[in-house]
Image (cartoon, rainbow, N blue to C red):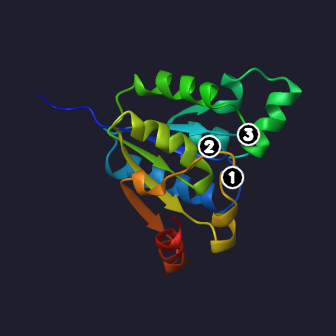
């Protein structure tokens, strides 16, 4: 019996910038080489590339899953949205039985860790600089050691990660 393969990518947005463009290229490559793999993307915010992503995969827009009042929109932008709302959305997506969950930037790490708590394999692609790493998720405890695999643009990430408590 052939096992269905599914990947969930999490992206901070679908803007026409480096990390989302790289993710789009990766998804196009996977679909070209392995069209049998189901790909889903959870976007934490929208962007101009959203419709292009939709040509290659199923897209979920986090903002559309959350009540759209002004307070929640600000909380989303600042990364301060209540943990229980994030957890509820993750619990809904887990039902899709993903083989791996791939966070496309450090901004997705709090979601990635929720998937990890549910025993899913996790990958975090770190594009950010050492400075931005120090600013990440100050309102939540982010234990990067819980992530299964990392892809990093530079060695700076690994030396920073190792030195942190």
The residue labelled by disc 1 is 138
Between 90 and 30, the one nearer to me in the picture: 90
Q: Classify mark 3: residues with Cα within 10 Å, few (<14), some (14-19) or many (20+).
A: some
Q: Is residue 39 visible?
A: no
Q: Nearer the viewer, mark 3 or mark 1?
A: 1
Q: Earlier in the sequence, mark 2 or mark 3?
A: 2
Q: Earlier in the sequence, mark 3 or mark 1?
A: 3
Question: Which labelled disc corresponds to residue 52?
Answer: 2
Marks 3/1: CA–CA distance: 9 Å
Between 127 and 157, the one nearer to me in the picture: 157
Picture layout, residue 69 above or below residue 135: above
Asked which secondary structure carries label 3, the reply is loop
Picture layout, residue 84 above or below residue 138: above
Asked which secondary structure carries label 1, the reply is loop
Among all residues in the image, which is located at the extreme front? 165
In the rendering, at what x and y percent does residue 64 appear?
A: 70, 25
Identified at 40% across, 22% down, the residue is 95
Whether label 2 touches label 3, CB < 8 Å:
no
Quadrant of the image containing the N terminus: top left
Q: Earlier in the sequence, mark 2 or mark 1?
A: 2
Marks 2/3: CA–CA distance: 28 Å
Asked which secondary structure carries label 2, the reply is helix
Q: Classify mark 1: residues with Cα within 10 Å, few (<14), some (14-19) or many (20+).
A: few
The residue labelled by disc 3 is 80
Q: Nearer the viewer, mark 2 or mark 3?
A: 3
Identified at 55% across, 52% down, the residue is 24
For this view, does 4 lie left or right of residue 163? left
Q: Nearer the viewer, mark 2 or mark 1?
A: 1
């Amino acid at each position: 019996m052939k096992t269905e393969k599914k990947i969930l990518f999490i992206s901070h947005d679908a803007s026409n910038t480096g990390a989302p463009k790289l993710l789009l290229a990766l998804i196009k490559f996977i679909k070209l080489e392995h069209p049998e793999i189901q790909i889903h993307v959870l976007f934490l915010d929208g962007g101009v590339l959203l419709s292009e992503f939709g040509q290659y995969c199923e897209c979920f827009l986090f903002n559309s899953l959350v009540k759209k009042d002004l307070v929640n929109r600000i909380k989303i932008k600042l990364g301060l949205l209540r943990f229980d709302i994030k957890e509820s959305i993750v619990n809904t997506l887990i039902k899709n039985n993903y083989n791996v969950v791939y966070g496309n930037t450090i901004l997705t790490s709090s979601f990635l860790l929720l998937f990890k708590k549910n025993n899913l394999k996790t990958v975090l692609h770190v594009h950010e600089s050492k400075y931005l790493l120090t600013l990440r998720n100050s309102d939540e405890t982010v234990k990067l050691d819980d992530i299964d695999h990392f892809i990093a643009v530079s060695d700076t990430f690994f030396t920073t990660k190792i030195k942190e408590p």
